[in-house]
Amino acid sequence: MEWIEILPIALAVASPRSQSKPMLTIVYVQKDPDGANELAKSLGLDYRVVHCPECQTALAGARRRDSHALILDLEVGAEEPFTLLEELRRIADAPPVLALSRSDDPRPVVRALRSGATDVLRKPPRAAEIRSALIRCLGEPERDIPYPIGNSAAARELGRQIKAFAEHDFPILITGESGTGKELATRAIHNFSARKHGPQIARNCAALPTELIESELFGSTRGAFTGAADRPGAFELAHGGTLFLDEIGDASAETQVKLLRALESGSVWRLGAKEPKRVDVRFISATSRDLNEAMAQGSFRPDLFYRIETLQLRIPPLRERIEDIPILTRAFLREAGKGCKDIGEDALDKLVGYRWPGNIRQLRNAIQRAVVLSGGRELIRAEDIVVQD
C-alpha cells in the first residue's frame, strides 16, 4: 500500500514564510486518514503530511529516507508499532518517531520510549504540542524550553495549571520536595504570562545570610549600615516582571513582616530610606517545608501565608511520574552533549527502578555523571549509571 499525501487546505495561498522555508515530510502512521488530514491543517505549510496506514510501509519508506519524522499511533496494531520502533533503531540515520497513546497505563508509554520513540504524546494532542515535539525531535531551535517535560498524567496536569495560573497576576505558592523544579515552574509561568518581556528575579531565603536578606529584597541607601550603598533590592529589580522567592518558609520573623507590608501596599522601603518606592511585580514564592505545620509552631505568620497562597501549585516528586524518566533522560542527554546520543535499555531499567529522593535535580546529575563515565560512547550503559543517595 502506498503513502497518501495530505495537503493543507491553505496550500493555494502560501505565505512568504512557507515559500522561503523547505517543507519537511512527516509520515503519520495511523489507520484513519482523517487524523492525518487534521494534522495537516494544524501544522500548516511548514510540513508535508503523508498518511501511512501500515507499519511495514512506513518502515520501507524510512529505509528509502523518504521522510524527516514519523508520527506513530500506538493503537495502529498490537505489536506492530513496537516492532517498527525496534526495526528503525537498526537503521542508520533513521527518522525520529513521535508516538501517540490514548492509554492511561504508563507501561506502553515506557515501552515505546525504550524501543526508540523520541517522545510520546497523549491522544488527542493539541497542535501546539505536536509542533513543539516535532521541533525538538528534528533538532530545530525552539525559543522556550517546554516545561514540564513529560507525558505522565502528573506532568500534563502540572502543565495545564501553569498555563492557567500564568493568565492572572495573583500570588502563587509553589510547594514540592527539593529538586522537583520549582524555579523551572516559575520560569514557565513567567514565559506564558503577559509579563514575559519583563525581568525575572529570583532569590533564595535559605541561601541568604540573615543580615543581608532584607537589603537583598528591599534595597538599601547609602549609610544605612556599614558599607551600605544606594542599590535596589529584588522587588525593584523585578518591577514590571516576576519576583520568585524560594524557600520562603526560612524567612525570619522580621523579614516576614516586611514582605507582608510590601505585598499589601505595593511599595518597598529601602533600608535607611525616608519614603517608599512603588513596585509592580508578580510575586511567586516556593517552599519545601510544610507551612501549615510552621504556622502551628509559630514560625510562619498566618497573615503572610494567606497573602501568598492565593493560588497553590504542587510540583509532584519524580517517583509519582516514573513514566517521564525516559523523556527527561533524553532531554538531559541532549543538554549534556559530549557525543552521547541515547541510553541503553539496561541503563533505562536502572533509572526507572530507582526512587529518586533528590528528584529531577538528582536525575540530571546522574545523567551528567553517566556522560562522563561513558568515555565518549554514543550509548549510555547500566554501568555508567552511578546514583549517590
Image: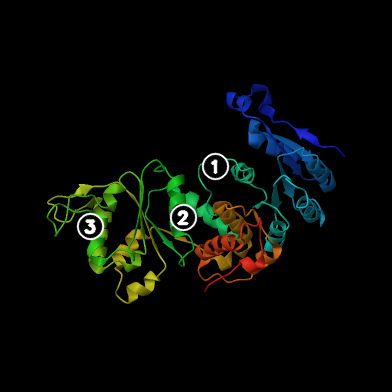
Judging by the rendered image, the residue that carries numbered circle 2 is: 184
The x and y percentages for residue 240 are: 33, 43
Quadrant housing the N terminus:
top right
Task: Mark 1 or mark 2: name the one nearer the start of the chain.
Answer: 1
Alpha-carbon neighbours of circle 2 within 10 Å: few (<14), some, or many (≥20)? some
Residue 291's place in the image compared with 268, above or below, is below
- Amino acid of disc 2: Leu
Residue 221's place in the image compared with 68, above or below, is below
Q: As drawn, which residue projects farthest toward the right?
A: 1
Q: As drawn, which residue projects farthest toward the front?
A: 375
Inspect this view and state whether residue 84 appears.
yes
Judging by the rendered image, the residue that carries numbered circle 3 is: 215
Query: Which element is circle 1 on?
Result: loop
- Amino acid of disc 1: Glu
- Foreground of the two, 354 or 168: 354
The x and y percentages for residue 205 are: 32, 63
Residue 148 as seen in the image, left or right of residue 170 = right
Alpha-carbon neighbours of circle 1 within 10 Å: few (<14), some, or many (≥20)? few
Task: Mark 2 or mark 3: name the one nearer the start of the chain.
Answer: 2
Question: Mark 1 and mark 3: span between their CA atoms?
Answer: 37 Å
In front of the other: label 1 or label 2? Answer: 1
Judging by the rendered image, the residue that carries numbered circle 1 is: 142
Marker disc for residue 117: none
Residue 373 as seen in the image, left or right of residue 307 = right
Quadrant in the rendering for residue 86? bottom right
Query: Which element is circle 2 on?
Result: helix
Question: Mark 2 and mark 3: span between their CA atoms?
Answer: 25 Å
The x and y percentages for residue 133 are: 62, 46
- Amino acid of disc 3: Ser
Query: Which element is circle 3 on?
Result: helix
Alpha-carbon neighbours of circle 3 within 10 Å: few (<14), some, or many (≥20)? many
- Foreground of the two, 120 or 229: 229
